Image: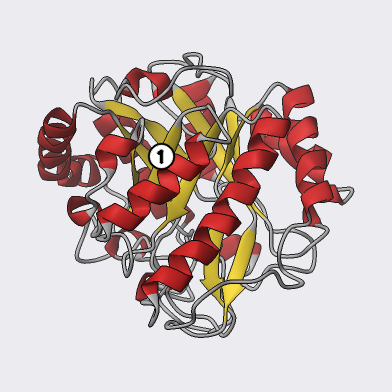
Amino acid sequence: MNARRRAAGALLTAALLLAGCSSGSGDGPAPGPGARTGSGDGGKAAGLRGITLPSWNTGDYAGPDAAPYLRQIAATGARWVTFTPTWYQDGTTDAGMHTTGETAGDDALRHIIGLAHTTGLKVMLKPHVDLTKGGDRAEIRPGDPDAWFAAYERFITHYAELAAGTKTEQLAVGTELAGTSRDGTRWSKVVRAVRARYRGPLTYAANYDEYRTVPFWDDLDVIGIDAYWPLADHATADTDRLRDAWKPITGELAAFSARHHRKILFTEAGYVSQRGTTTAPYSWTVSKSGGEDEQAAAYEALLTALDGQPWWAGVCWWMWDDWPDAGETPHRLAYTPHGKPAEKVLRQHWK
């Protein structure tokens, strides 16, 4: 989910990666930074279940709410948490990205990774690139690809080194960069640079309408998809209907997994608690009407439809609470399941 939420009413396409990830099959161990990777063993991600805790400001991850949030996440039955340090570029054709006041500080990131491990949570680090004026990161199409990929390699290897140093259990090499992700040669070079610094399992978080055109899945350990497929053409809290809507999707994903000999992780999935969320799960602003029942039904449908699928590595839910004074969507309408019926669904499946 695009962290850049400044354009009110904008339809934001889903973005992200291995965060907290979930599978009804339990929480299997993922190898740490010393593990051998690159074999295509999608089982490395099997059993993951977790929730993303994004950051919108430099000091969020070092703030007093960090520890309580992590305890709340663990209390749902999640075993993983995803963190999303974000860099920005000013325009879609720019040759590079940079930090801003909304970029999580490295010390704050190290702090919260340590807290997560103390809380008993494994960590997925999922760095993002967004646009300073808002918009969809999928629209990034650099005018000078060589310069952009050189800058991107510096950006992502910075976090590969941080992940290795903090014993972070998994790393996403990119999120929803559909404007560049067809460039398999340059992306493969990026992945090699990451592997030279970090030996844990890698994924890439492709948007649900992007994953088929990504040519470098064989360079990674698990296929990552931000699973924001529309499930209905009008608002509904009918769990059976929503579960049935997953059938053609799961059939396609099973075949895709078999072709690439890798499991598929839902690096993001989520639903706002707004009426109509299942018609456009990628939107922060489907309506102004509450829809906690529809959000909960969507959670239930995904977990029951995917549970037991042998190709499925789990789901990373977007997202836990906003930081104080940072939220632009009222809690009652936001993606968070916290304190809503959707949280009860998670607890029933995960505890």
Q: Position of residue 92 (x, y in %)?
A: 44, 82
Q: Is residue 268 visible?
A: no
Q: Residue at x 56, y 33 (%)?
A: 198
Closer to us: 30 or 81: 30
In the figure, residue 25 lies in which quadrant? top left
Closer to us: 85 or 312: 85
Q: Tell me if 144 is positioned left or right of 81 in this view.
A: left
Vertical order, 163 against 46 (above or below): below
Q: Quadrant of the C terminus?
A: top right
Q: Position of residue 337 (x, y in %)?
A: 56, 47
Q: Tell me if 97 is positioned left or right of 288 in this view.
A: right
Vertical order, 133 against 121 (above or below): below
Closer to us: 238 or 109: 109
Residue type at numbered disc 1: Thr
Q: Position of residue 93 (x, y in %)?
A: 42, 83
Q: Residue at x 38, y 72 (%)?
A: 145
Q: Tell me if 44 is positioned left or right of 228 in this view.
A: right
Q: Name the residue tied to disc 1.
A: 203
What kind of colouring is applied to the model shown?
secondary structure
